[in-house]
Amino acid sequence: MKQFLTRLFHHEELKREEACHLMQGITAGKYNPTQIASLLTVFQMRGITVEELIGFREALLSTRIPVDLSACHPIDIVGTGGDGKNTFNISTCACFVVAGAGYPVAKHGNYGSSSVSGASNVLEAHGVRFTADPDRLKASIEGCGIAYLHAPLFNPAMKAVAAIRKELGVRSIFNLLGPLINPSLPEKQLLGVADLQLMRLYTNTLQRLGIEFAVVNNLDGYDEISLTDEFKIMTNRYETIRKPSDLGFTLARQEDLYGGKDVAEAARIFDNVLENKATKAQTDCVLINASFAIQVLEPQLSIEECVARSRRSLTSGEALRTFRKFIILNQ
């Protein structure tokens, strides 16, 4: 570790194999907390390269509890978090809209860290019991089109740094790794990021990994398409900036997307969206994110056609029926 730190202090970059070896040592408990904290600080100050990110990812995935859902060819829909906006559970709602439209989803998530309610919070509030049992997860995705993978059950290596991360209290490379270590290794992903620097990092990383993707960012700092401003999309096929009005949506206000003061309020907003009782801003925000996820799965479709499929999933009640069946299968 001393050698690694000395090199990093001199602005050297690690090769993929070196980063993998370093992360394996961290998760195996070979280094002391002060060294690990110093390492996290270095990367937070100077940023991380694609090679380093891929190496760290390989190390964490090597210790994961694997789940094979590849026969379903699912997509993961996830945000990096950390935008500080405390929005409602937009990505999780979008998952059920996508599944309701007939597309399989393998959602990797956790409890909220920068918001009141993460994906695990809102699902647990509905009585969902998390599992790492591959048979139950397969039954879920085959029965209702979606499986939920609660991150702590699948990534035991992360426990080695949990206390250090909590004591540091700031974002670190582990926050960047979260969206990349879905234990089912989905080949398709919609990924929301909070700034353009992260957008470029993840785009280059996902291209290297051979994943079909859309990385999205609202230009006013949301890690999803919030419709509160112009937004940028980068995929395997194109890169563009759009206005909400380009797709027939009205501009939303930031307060329209408020996630609530506690998990109970967040769960009520979640229910309202799927029951098609939410405000226009809440509904539109979920629809637009679901639509770009569908386009990752169906790249031959225009985004307008994808919006129509998302809207049909929600207004027909299919998204809600999918969610209710999901709850039954996961209690």
Image (tube, helix red, strand yellow):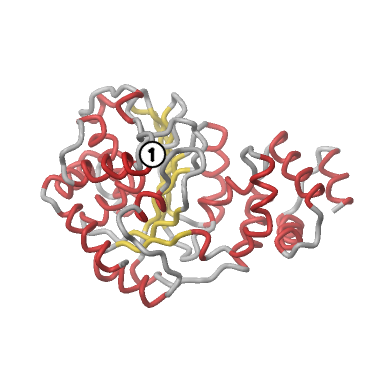
Q: Which of the two residues, 62 or 131, is positioned nearer the viewer here?
A: 131
Query: Image quarter for residue 238?
Result: top left
Q: Residue at x 44, y 26 (%)?
A: 219
Is 167 left, or right, of 176 in this rendering? right
Q: Which residue type carries mark 1?
A: Asp
Spot occupied by residue 24 in the image (x, y as percentages of width and height): 72, 63
- State how many labels appear: 1
Looking at the image, residue 237 lies above or below residue 131: above
Q: Quadrant of the C terminus?
A: bottom left
- Mark 1 surroundings: few (<14), some (14-19) or many (≥20) residues within 10 A: few
Q: Which of the two residues, 145 or 58, is positioned nearer the viewer here?
A: 145
Spot occupied by residue 230 in the image (x, y as percentages of width and height): 37, 24
Q: Residue at x 30, y 47 (%)?
A: 94
Spot occupied by residue 42 in the image (x, y as percentages of width and height): 76, 39
Residue under numbered circle 1: 262
Is 189 left, or right, of 41 in this rendering? left
Q: Residue at x 73, y 55 (%)?
A: 19
Looking at the image, residue 163 lies above or below residue 195: below
Query: Image quarter for residue 56?
Result: bottom right
Toward the left, the furthest residue is: 316
Is 322 left, or right, of 239 in this rendering? left
Q: Secondary structure at mark 1?
A: loop
Q: Which of the two residues, 41 or 187, is positioned nearer the viewer here?
A: 41
Spot occupied by residue 259 in the image (x, y as percentages of width and height): 36, 35
